[in-house]
């Protein structure tokens, strides 16, 4: 039967390419095309940001940053937004020895589990699925709950990320969403 005569509409699906998919497909080929100083390849942005963890240390900071990205993975968000969500732990740990111990012990336990299963620390585990499996093992721990709870508010209450998610912010003071395009969000 001819699709035109049947009244059926033919919809072609567009192929979407994610950042992860693109990077997996291209590997390091893009580095050869770019002119990058040799020293810039040695330190990732995450490692540089982790240096700001003066109390907890850069290793713990880098682990918390990786953890944050694995718990709430949003490719469109830069590391700086995750860092803004977890950096307050460093200041709190300076005043709260129990929190400092909780975070240090939690990272040590996560690294111990990663060493058992993969022979390397959590940060060095390359596959995201392997890291997520490690996080699932500790998701009921006070350490994981502390990081997860802080990320929920620290990341999603950040007004700088609202536009990146297509969220226009609070609407009640403008009359609500019913008359302002309640279904404008295209990512749901």
Image (spheres, rainbow, N blue to C red):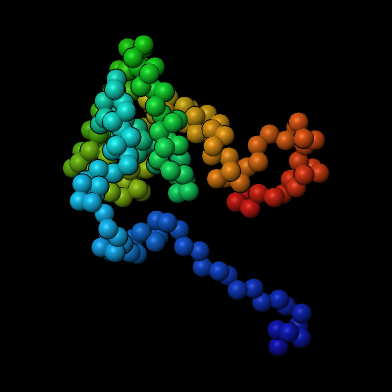
Among the 4 quarters of the image, the one containing residue 182: top right
Image height of 37 relative to 133, above or below: below
Tell me, yes or no, if residue 117 can be seen here.
no
* Residue under the image location 35 percent in, 17 percent down: 93
Which of the two residues, 98 or 119, is positioned nearer the viewer here?
98
Among the 4 quarters of the image, the one containing residue 18: bottom left
* Residue under the image location 60 percent in, 51 percent down: 187
* Residue under the image location 28 percent in, 31 percent down: 51
What percent of the width, then of the height, locates residue 131?
33, 43
Which of the two residues, 124 or 92, is positioned nearer the viewer here?
92
Give the quadrant of the N terminus. bottom right
Among the 4 quarters of the image, the one containing residue 48: top left
What percent of the width, then of the height, locates residue 127?
31, 50
**Residue 137 placement, left or right of 109:** right
What percent of the width, then of the height, locates residue 154?
49, 29
**Residue 55 placement, left or right of 171:** left
Image height of 96 relative to 179, above or below: above
């Amino acid at each position: 039967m001819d699709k035109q005569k049947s009244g059926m509409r033919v919809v072609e699906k567009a192929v979407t390419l994610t950042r992860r998919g693109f990077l997996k497909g291209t590997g390091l080929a893009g580095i050869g095309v770019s002119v990058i100083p040799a020293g810039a390849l040695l330190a990732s942005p995450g490692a540089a940001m982790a240096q700001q963890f003066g109390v907890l240390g850069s290793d713990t900071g880098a682990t918390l940053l990786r953890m944050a990205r694995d718990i709430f993975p949003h490719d469109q968000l830069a590391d700086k937004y995750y860092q803004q969500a977890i950096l307050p732990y460093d200041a709190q740990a300076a005043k709260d020895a129990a929190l400092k111990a909780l975070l240090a012990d939690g990272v040590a336990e996560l690294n111990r589990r990663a060493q058992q299963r993969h022979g390397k620390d959590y940060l060095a585990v390359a596959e995201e699925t392997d890291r997520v499996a490690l996080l699932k093992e500790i998701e009921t721990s006070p350490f994981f709950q502390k990081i997860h709870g802080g990320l929920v508010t620290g990341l999603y209450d950040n007004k700088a990320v609202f536009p990146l998610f297509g969220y226009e912010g609070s609407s009640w003071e403008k009359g609500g969403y019913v008359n302002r395009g309640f279904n404008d969000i295209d990512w749901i």
